[in-house]
Every structure is written in structure tokens, then in C-alpha cells.
Image: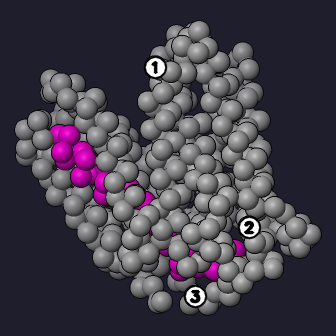
Amino acid sequence: MCHPVHSSRIDFSRSTFLLPALVLFGINLRTLLLVIPPLLPRIQRQLGLSYTATGLLNALPILIMGTMAVPAALVIGRIGAQWAVRISLVLMLLAAVLRGLVASTIMLYVMTIAISLAITLGQTTSPMIVREWFPRRIGQTTALYSIGLMIGEILAAALTVPLILPLVAGQWRGALLLWSLPEVLALALWVIAFPLTREVAQTGTYPRPLALPTPSPLRPRDVLLASLALGGGSMLFFGMDTWIPVYAHSIGATNGPLTLTVLTIAQLPPSLALATWGQHLAGKRIGFVLAGSVATLALLGWFILPPYWFPVLAGMIGASSASIFILGLSLPALLAHGAGVARMSGTMLGVGYTLAFIGPFIGGALWDYTHIALTAFFPILLSAVLVIVSGALLPLRHD
């Protein structure tokens, strides 16, 4: 593998270690978070947690990722992308191991906070890595990285109870420890794929593989529009993920679990499509408008169609949210440069996860106030419309 200091470009098709390292990094950013929900009943029972404390344990990562993404971008601007990723991986590994070893409830929360901070640092850095190493394939590489995130979500949700728990005699601490092992592989592969040189150690950043043109300065309005588009997409997924099982149960629908599964799995087909053809849509308005429109139609159908349509509608929403996330995550690398990539990424992720955190609460408040279950989905419908409007007003990419 050619080192970027001595090579004018990186061949996308022959990046033997770079792409696997990036995808595995994305997988680990999600498995360490999504392992908690399947274990919550055991954790709650053994530690005697209240429902409020149980909900907080699950919601803390989203809150931290929303509030700490911008500070993370400032840190990245000082230490550089490569050091940021390494620190993220090491902190995730240490906190994941300690989370499985600690005995007290307080330490469980502390380690969850530490993992969330490490994940925030890592995922805020990823657009910078993509721009530096894959400047000619930003859309496709962002899609592959995002596929890693989604695979991590699916693996943690699907394997923890039927496979991991039997291996550790049903002990949730053992399951947490076992899920920390892939983090060792992720760290090792990253170090192999992205070796630090003397120049990197001195400057904190790699020299770019290609001399990229400097984009025009971004206006605050442009960053805000990009943040709202990404935030609307995040709200689509997390809002539906929150309310599908509760709403289905409240109306006596039996397909709630199937609908939730379809919502998650439906993210993969558009992700694979964007990994192949994403470069044609990356940085363009049409992708956001189309995905937002599909989600809007599906949500309108959610209000008027009978429950047997739920899996189909959830599939449309899941596919739309994944497309919006990938297209949104590619914007910092396309529209910003230098440390501005991390700043824009931090702002967008901060807005996205903040909306994902507060949106379900607004939906719940509407349900409580009106006693009409469907009102919980009003904020989700508004988020789909928000994607269309903000996406249509985004600055155009100049190739």
C-alpha cells in the first residue's frame, strides 16, 4: 500500500486496508451503544433501576452526541484527524472493558458517558478522514462508512440476546465485555491502515493524497440548512424507532416487532446503492428532496392506512432516513476544507442528535396532552417536510 506522503493519489479500488478499517470503525461506533437496549431488562432488574434511570441510560448517548459534537470538532481542529480517531478508539476500548467490569450503577453511567464522548469524537472526525483519503469518491466512501454504522446497529440488536448472552451464562456484564473485543481489532486495523509518520506526528494531520480545490467559504446559513437536513433525517429514524412499538401496542396491532425490524433493515438497500452510485448524488439537492418526499408520503400513509401497511411504510421511512444520513454526512467533506470539515461535521451531528433526542419527547407530550396516539408522529412528519425544504435550499456542489 502506497503511503500518501510518497503518492499523488490513493487508488479507491486497491485500498486494501483503508476501507475495511473505516467500515470496521463505523461498526464499532454503533455496537457499543446498541448493545445496551437488549440488555436493559437484565440491567434494570439486577441493579434495581427505576424506569427513569433505565430510560436515562439508553438516552444518554444521544444527548451527549448532540451536545458534544461541536466541542469535539474544536478538539479535532487542534490535534488533527488521525490523533482524534486513535484517541476515540483507545477511549472506547478502555471504557467498554471497564463498563463490563464495574459493579456500581454510578460507574456504569460514567463509562457509558465515556463511550459516548469517544464515539462523538470519532464520528465527528470521519468526514475529515473521507475527504483526506478518498477525495474523488466522497459520496461512495461515506456510504460504505455509513453501512458500517448500520451493520453495527443490526449486529448488536440481533446477536446480543440469542448468541452473546448464552456464551457468558446470561450475564449482562459478560456480554458487555465480549462486545469490547471487536474494538481491539478495529484499533489494530486502523493503526495498520493509517500509520503515523514523523510529519503526521508533528502536524497532527496527513498531507492530502490529492491537491483538492478549496471550496468557497461557507455561510452560516448553508451550515444551518445542512444541519437541519441531517437532523430531519435523524429524527425520522429515531422518532419511528421510539414510537412504533408503543403505538402498535396501543392500537392492538400485532405487527409492531416486524415493523421495527423492517425500519432498521430497510436502511441497507439504499446504503448499498449509494455505495455504488452515490458520487452522482453527493452534494446535490435532488437526493434530499426525493428522500424527504418519500418519507412524507409514507408518514401521510401512516395516518390514513390500516396497520397491515405499517411494515411497508416503515421500510420507506427507513430507506429515506438512511439516504438522508449518508447524503448529509458527505456534505462537510464536499463543501468545507481543512479544520472546517470537522467544524461543519460537528455542527451537523450536534443538531441531528439533538433533534433525535428531543423529537420523541415532543411526540410523547403531544400524545399525553391530546390523548390521541397518532399525534406522537406529528414531529416526525414535520421533520420529513424539513428535509425537503432545507435540502431544496442547500448550496450546490461545484464539481
Q: Mark 2 points at which residue?
A: 1
Q: What element carries label 1?
A: helix
- Vertical side of 129 occupied by 210: above or below: below
Q: Position of residue 306 (x, y in %)?
A: 7, 38
The magenta span reads: 310-339
* Label 2 – label 3 distance at C-alpha: 29 Å
Q: What residue type is labelled 3?
A: Pro
Q: In this view, does 200 lie to the left or right of 176?
A: right
Q: Earlier in the sequence, mark 1 or mark 2?
A: 2
Q: Name the residue under label 1.
A: 162
Q: Which amino acid does label 2 sit on?
A: Met
Q: Where is residue 37 in the image (x, y as percent from the top left)?
A: 48, 28
Residue 364 visible, this angle: no
Write the residue at 81% across / 77% down: 5
- Vertical side of 282 occupied by 60: above or below: above
Q: Mark 3 points at which residue?
A: 215
Write the residue at 38% across / 51% down: 268
Q: Is mark 2 on a helix, strand or loop?
A: loop
Q: Which amino acid does label 1 sit on?
A: Pro
Residue 246 is one of the magenta-drawn residues = no
* Label 1 – label 2 distance at C-alpha: 39 Å
Q: In this view, does 25 lie to the left or right of 204?
A: left
